[in-house]
Image (cartoon, helix red, strand yellow):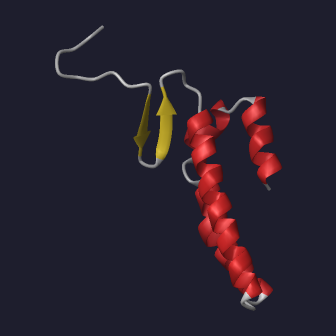
């Protein structure tokens, strides 16, 4: 069904979560893993600069774990086995 002036899209970002028309969360998982990878690189830089382990752990929880956990009840139950495995392999 087409409505005049309204564009149909295949995916949309709503409150930081990428929803796809196929009810797949491949794009969202890829986006989250990319962001987490960048943040883990930042943690490595902080470690190399001498930040204590306890403080690294706190920063990890704040910038990586929070990213993974954000809105998890909305998209987590809809992940297929491949996406769960992809997330597990990243960490």
Look at the picture and state if 4 lies above or below 17: above
Look at the picture and state if 29 lies above or below 48: above
Residue 41 appears in view: yes
Q: For this view, does 62 lie left or right of residue 21?
A: right
Q: For this view, does 38 lie left or right of residue 44?
A: left
Q: Position of residue 24 (x, y in %)?
A: 59, 28
- Name the residue located 21 percent from the left edge and 14 percent from the top edge: 3
- Name the residue located 80 percent from the left edge and 39 percent from the top edge: 85
Q: Position of residue 15 (x, y in %)?
A: 41, 48
Q: Residue furthest left?
A: 4
Give residue 44's quadrant in the image.
bottom right
Q: Position of residue 77 (x, y in %)?
A: 66, 35
Give residue 79's quadrant in the image.
top right
Give residue 4's quadrant in the image.
top left
Q: Position of residue 48 (x, y in %)?
A: 76, 85
- Name the residue located 77 percent from the left edge and 32 percent from the top edge: 82
């Amino acid at each position: 069904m087409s409505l005049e002036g309204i564009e149909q899209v295949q995916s949309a970002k709503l409150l930081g979560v990428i929803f796809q028309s196929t009810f797949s969360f491949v794009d969202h998982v890829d986006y989250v893993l990319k962001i987490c990878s960048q943040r883990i690189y930042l943690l490595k830089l902080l470690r190399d600069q001498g930040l204590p382990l306890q403080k690294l752990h706190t920063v990890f929880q704040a910038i990586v774990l929070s990213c993974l956990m954000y809105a998890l009840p909305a998209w987590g139950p809809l992940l297929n086995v491949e996406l769960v495995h992809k997330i597990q392999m990243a960490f």
